[in-house]
Image (cartoon, grey):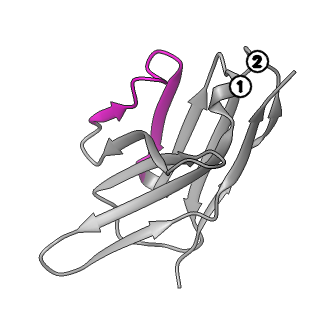
Amino acid sequence: QVQLVESGGGLVQPGGSLRLSCAPSRGIYSPNKMGWYRQAPGKQREMVATITSGGSTNYADSVKGRFTILKDNAKNSVFLQMNTLQPEDTAVYYCNFVRTTFLDGYNYWGQGTQVTVSS
C-alpha cells in the first residue's frame, strides 16, 4: 500500500512562510497530476494548487501570488512554498497524486499536515 508522506506544517506568524513537502513511501509510476488541498474547521476541502506532469499549474484565487507549487520529477515529489501567510490559511493541508492511463491508475492522498497561522 502506497502512502503519501507529508512534512513541513507547523505554527507560523502572519506574514511568515512555510514549505510543505510530499513524497510517496515507495516507488510509483509517475502521476499525471499532483496537488495540494486544504480543509479548515467547519469547511469543505478545497483545492489550493495543482501541477500536471507537463508542468501546468493551477491556483486557487485566494493564494495566487503567495503560494507556489513545485515538483521533483525524479523523486515523484511535490512541494508547496507558502509565503505571506495569513490567518485564513490555517487548515489541514493534504497532498494528492492522480494517475490515469489505459492500463492503470491511482488516486492517493496524504494523511494531512496542520498549518496554523497565528500571532
38 vs 55: above or below = below
Is residue 119 positioned above or below 23 on the image?
A: above
Q: Secondary structure at mark 1?
A: helix
Residue 8 shows in this picture: no
Asked whether 93 or 80 is in front, the reply is 93
> Residue drawn at (41%, 60%), measured in percent from left and top?
97
The answer to whether residue 22 is left or right of residue 78 is right
The crowd level at tag 1 (other Cα within 10 Å; few <14, some 14-19, many 20+) is some
Res 117 quadrant in image: top right
Residue topped by disc 2: 14
Which residue is found at the position 69% from the left and 36% from the top?
Answer: 90
Kindly give the residue lying farthest to the right in the view shown: 119
The answer to which of marks 2 and 1 sits earlier in the sequence is: 2
User: Do labels 2 and 1 touch, CB within 8 Å?
Assistant: yes
Q: Is residue 73 left or right of residue 4?
A: left
Residue annotated with mark 1: 87
Name of the residue lying farthest toward the front? 42
Residue at figure coordinates x 49%, y 47% from the top left: 37
Say above or below: 67 vs 104: above
What is the tally of numbered marks visible in this picture? 2
Residue placed farthest to the left in the image?
102
Q: Helix, strand, or loop for circle 2?
A: loop
Q: Which residues are magenta?
A: 56-73
Tell me if mark 2 has few (under 14), some (14-19) or many (20+) residues whose alpha carbon lies within 10 angstroms of its own.
some
Q: Position of residue 67 (x, y in %)?
A: 52, 25
Give the x, y percent position of residue 46.
Answer: 45, 45
Closest to the camera, between mark 2 and mark 1, is 1
Q: Position of residue 104 (x, y in %)?
A: 23, 80
Residue type indicated by callout 2? Pro
Q: Position of residue 11 (x, y in %)?
A: 83, 35
